[in-house]
Image (cartoon, rainbow, N blue to C red):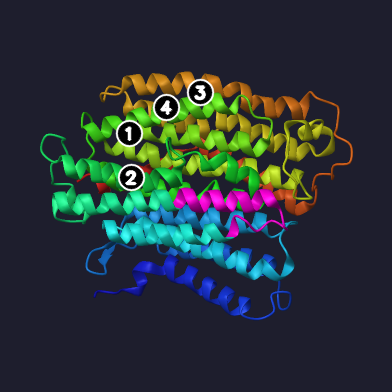
Amino acid sequence: MNLHPALIIPELFQFLLILALFLQSMGDGAKGPRPGRWVPLFAALGIVAAVAGFPARGLLFHDVYQVDALSQFFKLAIAIGFFVTVSNASRQPTLPENKRSDYFLFLALSAEGLMLLSSSTELFTLYLALELSSYSLYTVISLRARDKGAAEAGIKYILFGAVATALALYGLSYVLAGQHTTYIAELTGKSWTWANSPQAVIGLALFLGGMFYKLALFPFHFWCPDVYQGTSNETATFAATLPKLGAVVVLVRLSAFLTPGLEITTLLAWLGAISMTLGNLSALAQKDVKRILGFSSVAHAGYVMVGLVSGTAEGMAAAAFYALAYVAMNLLAFWVVSRVASDGRNLKLDDLNGLYKRAPVLAFALAVGAFALVGLPPSVGFIGKLFLITSAWNHGYNWLVITLAVNSAFAIYYYLSLVRHAYTEETVAAGSAEPDTSAFSLVGAGILSAVVLILGLLPSPVFDLAIAAGQGVIR
């Protein structure tokens, strides 16, 4: 077994954090240094570790683990997202004090699983990494101060996850029986037409179900709005962002052999079209802000498919870039939700009324996040959709590109409804807690808003990294 620690610096650093949290959780959780204070600092150093390990390249563990441009791109994104999510969770009002060490431990374990998922190039390894990232979230979803809705959300997430896991494992067995290998590099050279390999095509479709579940793509989306609504705002921030990166990196690797015109590629295109349409239309009827963002996740999962079905390095790069853009936009939106709901409650649209007076910085950040999610310039949402459209046009799925454009128009109503309530409605609900306007809250909102705008104005450095990653997958 070939093991070179220099190739896995981000994973090793994350493991040290897990070990430290595990040791603290073994004692009295109410004693010792509060995890909410030191874990964000450690996570910030994790970004440094990911940057230091970015140039690493190589194969490990009998070639089931590949460190390449694609994996390092996503590990850096996961490290940054993990830092933001644990910083956001450091002031979680609905989490019992004696459970904070356990809470951060499971978040760290999930992030570690996603990093492992980024480098996995063999289906059984993918499956194990997927389960590591999933099991940790099963635990934390229900941690919300004796809230029945959180318990319901936890049960739904586990049940849907169990079904998706069973389908993925069953499909893996079909792929192995049909193609006689589980290495992605070898699968790339196999036939994936229905006429030649019907068993393998069925198996791959079932295996992809596990990724669709993480991505909240139709028809594995049912859990998403209910879980976002039931779990705490801070946990929803994590569940709505980092797992999407893990799902996209796997789909990008598998898309290397999903050329336009194949039955499985056409299936992905149709699922993407249904997902974006269903997600946007369902969001129009919602009043709970997290349910709106939940159905928004379903729609954005469909957008990612536009890049994946193109069969080109540019399409894969566009999908990777859009996944990063979506995480940045969602981190901003959920940061504002968590800070406005300073008492941990679920926000309704009416709770945003008059936000421009009560917390003008948070209102501005909400507007930036909403405009970005719509896809308006100069935000990263606009440039991300532009990359998707240009990469997929004239590659056999122009109808899917048109569907994306039409759905972006649908989305304008409910995203801008958030801004309308924040800036034009004056009636404030009585008895609700005031927004958190501390320096921590406002600086975080300002930085995330700047990231969303700067990535939209200057996308080239990041997109060039995504292009290099995509070219590395398609040889």
- Label 1 SS: helix
Q: Is residue 458 above or below residue 40?
A: above
Q: Amino acid at mark 3?
A: Ser
Where is residue 192 drawn, in percent x and y?
Answer: 17, 40
Residue at the disc numbered 1: 268
Q: Amino acid at mark 2?
A: Leu
- First in sequence, mark 1 or 4: give its number: 1
Residue at the disc numbered 4: 274
- First in sequence, mark 2 or 1: give its number: 2
User: Can the viewer see residue 465?
Assistant: no
Crowding near pointer 3: few (<14 within 10 Å), some, many (20+)?
many
Q: Is residue 235 above or below residue 15?
A: above
Query: On the rendered structure, is 71 left or right of 377?
Result: left
Residue at the disc numbered 3: 408
Q: CA distance from mark 3 to mark 4?
A: 14 Å
Residue at the disc numbered 2: 208
Where is residue 345 drawn, in percent x and y?
Answer: 75, 46
Q: Which residues are magenta?
A: 140-161
- First in sequence, mark 3 or 2: give its number: 2
Query: On the rendered structure, is 323 left or right of 190?
Result: right
Crowding near pointer 4: few (<14 within 10 Å), some, many (20+)?
some
* Circles 3 and 1 in contact, beta carbons < 8 Å: no
